[in-house]
Image: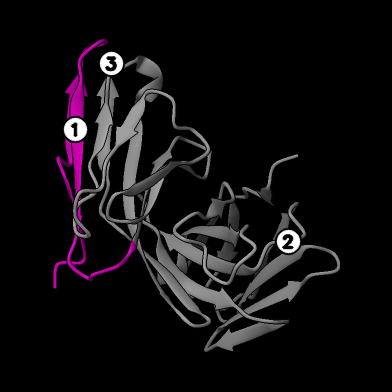
Amino acid sequence: NAGVTQTPKFQVLKTGQSMTLQCAQDMNHEYMSWYRQDPGMGLRLIHYSVGAGITDQGEVPNGYNVSRSTTEDFPLRLLSAAPSQTSVYFCASTYSGGAQETQYFGPGTRLLVL
Amino acid sequence: RKEVEQDPGPFNVPEGATVAFNCTYSNSASQSFFWYRQDCRKEPKLLMSVYSSGNEDGRFTAQLNRASQYISLLIRDSKLSDSATYLCVVNPGWGGTSYGKLTFGQGTILTVHP
């Protein structure tokens, strides 16, 4: 049971380049989310998904696209990278059972946009 | 006003000390509350869920005051290994589950020294 995995761990992009951050979970969780974390700030929600084929925007969706073709995978696409997208990106999947809820986070992707 | 506000600290305490963190939230409809721990350059991990008025887990006690819209975390008998950033997290949704949409505070930095 690998939990939530993310690739790559580190990435350097030039302004205008595009890329996809990969996220996968093997816990069969319905809910998955993408957050970004900037220095001195908490995590901010980019996009989330409540199941395969269903996605929605979070607090800071501009410049990012997502899709959810399977329960396991939830990739995040940067369409045209900008320096403001330099950040640490965390993917999470959520276990929700009755009154219990836990979000499991991947190890993060550190992105630098030059 | 931020949806979730925390004192960023840092809190520097000696081993064995008792330390308390407070967190306020703005959305009175918020349903559930959590404390996550984040070690340097790592992903957040669930420390405690906060139910009804509060709960206790070993040296950690979390309390919720819905009328004043604040949550607290008390750590007794601090250990060196407690050094981390503590994130106050709120489920802002109307239903029981967050659907993967959580709102994070900016975090409170704790350093426990010998």
Task: Bin the neighbour count of mark 3 within 10 Å (Cα to Cα): few under 14, some 14-19, many 20 and up.
Answer: some
Asked whether, in this view, residue B28 is left or right of residue A100, the answer is right
Task: Bin the neighbour count of mark 1 within 10 Å (Cα to Cα): few under 14, some 14-19, many 20 and up.
Answer: some
Asked whether, in this view, residue B40 is left or right of residue A7, the answer is right
Residue B60 sits inside the magenta stretch? no
Check if mark 1's residue and mark 3's residue have beta carbons within 8 Å. no
Kindly identify the amino acid type of the residue bearing the numbered disc 1. Thr
Q: Is residue B29 above or below residue A112?
A: below
Describe the element under mark 1 as helix, strand or loop.
strand
Kindly identify the amino acid type of the residue bearing the numbered disc 3. Ser
> Residue A51's image quarter?
bottom left
Label 1 lies in what chain?
A
Check if mark 2's residue and mark 3's residue have beta carbons within 8 Å. no
Q: Residue at x 75, y 51 (%)?
A: B26
Q: What residue is shown with label 2?
A: B29
Asked whether, in this view, residue A38 is left or right of residue A27, the answer is right
Q: Residue at x 53, y 87 (%)?
A: B57
* Image quadrant where one finds the N terminus of chain B: top right
Q: What residue is shown with label 1?
A: A20
Q: Which residues are magenta?
A: A1-30
How far apart marks 1 and 3 lie (CA) works out to 11 Å
Q: Can marks 1 and 3 be said to lie on one chain?
A: yes
Q: What residue is shown with label 3?
A: A80
Kindly identify the amino acid type of the residue bearing the numbered disc 2. Ala
> Residue B56's image quarter?
bottom right
Q: Residue at x 65, y 68 (%)?
A: B31
| Horizontal and vertical percent position of residue A95 | 37, 72
Sequence-first disc among 1 and 3: 1
How far apart marks 2 and 1 lie (CA) works out to 35 Å
Q: Nearer the viewer, residue A22 or B65?
A: A22
Describe the element under mark 3 as helix, strand or loop.
loop
Describe the element under mark 2 as helix, strand or loop.
loop
